[in-house]
Amino acid sequence: MESGEKKMKNNKNAKTTIEKATIAKTKYLETLALLKQGESQKANRCFKEANDCLLAASELHLGMINQDIELTLELICCEDMLATAGLYQSLIGYFNDLHQRTQNEKERSKWKK
């Protein structure tokens, strides 16, 4: 593949990676809002959708890194978006676990009364 074609493909992959990571980030925030509203099942589905988007973005990103590419603004932006979405994933997974435990405790306390 010629240099120009390779650069265009890398730019396209970078753009797609950024888009998928942004969708993941948005879905993670939506998950948080759903948890706050007490919509656990919807939140779990949304969290899974976000994880799928983040995985797709990560796979594209890995493919770019495995190639002999130059450091570009797009690649740096990909790194930033993936890191941010990964942080959201971790934090919202943690919040979801806390929410589930809280809900389970509330249910158990109803039976004790």
Image: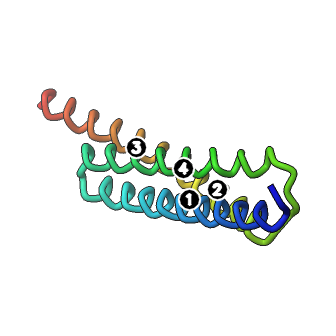
| Up-down relation of residue 110 to residue 15 (above or below) | above
Residue at (78% x, 72% y) in the render: 73
Marks 2/3: CA–CA distance: 16 Å
Q: CA distance from mark 1 to mark 2?
A: 6 Å
Mark 4 neighbour density, 10 Å: few (under 14) some (14–19) many (20 or more) = many
The residue tagged with tag 3: helix, strand or loop?
Answer: helix
Few, some or many C-alpha atoms within 10 Å of disc 2 (few <14, some 14-19, many ≥20)? Answer: many
Counting residues from the start of the chain, the first of labels 3 and 1 encountered is 1
Q: Which residue is mark 4?
A: 54
Q: Position of residue 85 (x, y in %)?
A: 57, 56
Residue sitting nearer the eye, 36 or 26: 26
Residue neighbourhood size for the residue with mark 3, other residues' Cα within 10 Å, grouped as few (<14), some (14–19), many (≥20): some
Per the image, the residue denoted by label 1 is: 21
Q: CA distance from mark 4 to mark 1?
A: 6 Å
- Kindly identify the amino acid type of the residue bearing the numbered disc 3: Lys
Who's the residue at 27% across and 33% down the image? 104
Q: CA distance from mark 2 to mark 4?
A: 7 Å
The reply to whether callout 2 and callout 4 are in contact (CB within 8 Å) is yes
Q: Secondary structure at mark 4?
A: helix
Can you say whether 63 is above or below 33 in the image?
A: above
Q: Are marks 1 and 2 in contact (CB under 8 Å)?
A: yes
- In the image, residue 104 sits, relative to residue 84, either above or below, namely above
User: Who comes first in sequence, dot 3 or dot 4?
Assistant: 3
Q: Mark 3 or mark 2, which is nearer the start of the sequence?
A: 3
The three-letter code of the residue at mark 2 reads: Leu
Judging by the rendered image, the residue that carries numbered circle 3 is: 48
